Image: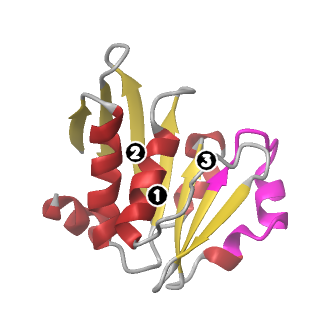
Amino acid sequence: MNEFLCYSVEDTLYLGKKIGSFLRGGEIFGLCGELGSGKTMFVKGVAIGLGYDGYVKSPTFTIINQYQTQHVSLIHIDIYRLTTFEELMLIGYESYLSEDYVVVIEWFDKFPELSKYPHMKIDFEYVDTSVRRLKFYSNFARYNELLKQL
């Protein structure tokens, strides 16, 4: 496990941007944490790091937002409103599991079935009103190598 303290929204954005700059496609990130803990801001940073310069918003109501970059598509999924893992499968989750996509899932811990896919899990915790602790977990070599680059 690695952890980082983000003292501002800009720190969270920067960390996401740095990670996004290392991604090549085929990665899955599972984000966990309370409302307002910085998950969507982190995804915005990942998008910027991948080369996307448009608007990034939470897919709470659309479930899936897709952002096209020159090399890959960023798939941003929010499963908060889904009730079963089967619903996620029915909307085509597995079709995004290829080198053409980077997939980021908010509320990842809602469906334990997601853990069967190689991924990096990131827990977002409040330290105080402006400080967040981000804890990175993975048992997969690909992601552990990524963490070494940070």
Q: Is residue 138 visible?
A: no
Please provide the residue range marked out in magenta. 77-94
| Sequence-first tag of 3 and 1 | 1
Q: Is residue 61 left or right of residue 27?
A: right
**Viewer-nearest of discs 3 and 1:** 1
Q: Please say whether residue 81 is one of the residues in the magenta stretch.
A: yes
Q: Is residue 52 left or right of residue 56?
A: left
- What residue is drawn where x is 41% and y is 33%? 124
Q: Disc 1 marks which residue?
A: 29
Q: Secondary structure at mark 2?
A: strand
Q: Disc 2 marks which residue?
A: 122
- Between marks 2 and 1, how big is the CA–CA gap? 7 Å
- Residue extending farthest front: 54
Q: Determine crowd level at label 2: few under 14, some 14-19, many 20+ residues with C-alpha closer than 10 A.
A: many
Q: Disc 3 marks which residue?
A: 112
Q: Amino acid at mark 3?
A: Pro
Coordinates of residue 115 in the picture (x, y in percent): 53, 55
Tags 2 and 1 touching, CB below 8 Å: yes
Q: Secondary structure at mark 1?
A: strand
